[in-house]
Image: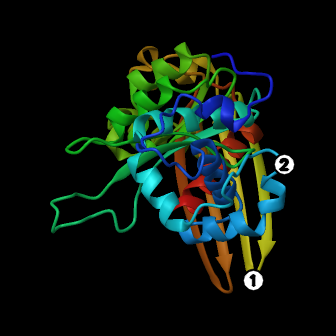
Amino acid sequence: MEHPSAPSISAYFGKVEDPRTGPIVWHKLIDIITIAICGVICGADSWVDIELFGKSEEEWLKKFLELPNGIPSHDTFGRVFALLDAEVFSTSFLEWVQAVSEVTKGQVVPIDGKTLRRSHDKALGKGTIHIVSAWASENRLVLGQVKVAEKSNEITAIPELLRILDVSGCIVTIDAMGCQKEIVRQIVEQGGDYVLALKENQGQLYEDVVELFAYEQQRDFEGVEHDFCETVNKGHGRIEKRRCWSISELEYLNYVNDKKEWEKLSSVVMVTAQRRIGEETSVESRYYISSLQGNARQLLGAVREHWGIENSVH
């Protein structure tokens, strides 16, 4: 997808049609959209907040907006956005975000599901809204979102989300729900790499990876080519030690169930997280498959980026 050299809001939202009719329109649509986007970026989370932002920054906004009748009221913001074509606006917004965020080679793109709070309305017969989002980890921006269809799940939404993203050269991370052969194939076909979590829902694949690492731990990984790294973080009375082992040796990967059906499968990974708070210590082990060769530090970094997104959106 080609973008203008200067990704201005007006360039990307020009195709959003103004839904208002009548002889008198007090405020230009592009002014309303621009103020709303700038307000949200600055932390506004209501139409009242956006109006207050506009009034406080009016002199700055006048440098690039016409504002023929000043700053719109919060009621105007609400009415106009309620009338906009949601699909066209969403497409324009995501294209603009992808243009202004520099998604660089090797950047981690976590994909994760989130349930919108207070989206359930029993009286109107509306179920809870669940969306799947892709994040640019370095920019801390949403690259794309897809609403999960009713009576469906994330497995059907993830391929749709991937289709609107450019993940070439990026590392896509997904939790165990998205660990599917078709999704892996799509990521690779779009030029990306993957680090996908494994859980019991993967059946034999999960069991094979767990057994492989259990066996090698007993032998202290003697005789198998592997990579290892460890990080330690301290603060607020907590000590967190994370250890990562990766195995990329083909002889051992062939032990994994249906290895050939997982496109570009190049390593299996085990991460242990040991947390000590006061006198209490807990240890948790997680397992992954990846298209990346076994650079344990890179793999642990991708896993930690995904954990960070999960913690920030839930």
Report which quarter residue 115 is drawn in: bottom left
Q: Where is residue 58 in the image (x, y as percent from the top left)?
A: 77, 61
In front: 259, or 214? 259
Q: Is residue 46 visible?
A: no
The three-letter code of the residue at mark 1 reads Gly
In front: 67, or 195? 67
Q: Position of residue 283 (x, y in %)?
A: 58, 65
In the picture of the structure, the residue carrying the numbered disc 1 is 237
In the displayed structure image, the side of residue 262 where residue 60 appears, left or right: right
Tell me the residue at 66%/71% (across/down).
Answer: 52
**CB within 8 Å, label 2 to label 1:** no
Tell me the residue at 74%/21% (across/down).
Answer: 4
The three-letter code of the residue at mark 2 reads Lys
Q: How many marks?
A: 2
2 vs 1, front mark: 2
Tell me the residue at 83%/60% (across/down).
Answer: 59
How would you rate the neighbour count of disc 2 (Cα within 10 Å): few for under 14, some for 14-19, many for 20 or more? Answer: few
In the picture of the structure, the residue carrying the numbered disc 2 is 63
Relative to 113, say whether 251 is above or below.
above
Relative to 273, say whether 64 is above or below.
above
Q: Can residue 9 be seen in this view?
A: yes
Q: Position of residue 276 (x, y in %)?
A: 67, 76
Tell me the residue at 39%/29% (across/down).
Answer: 180
Q: Is mark 1 on a helix, strand or loop?
A: loop
In front: 42, or 256? 42
- Farthest residue toward the front? 23
In the displayed structure image, the side of residue 120 where residue 305 appears, left or right: right
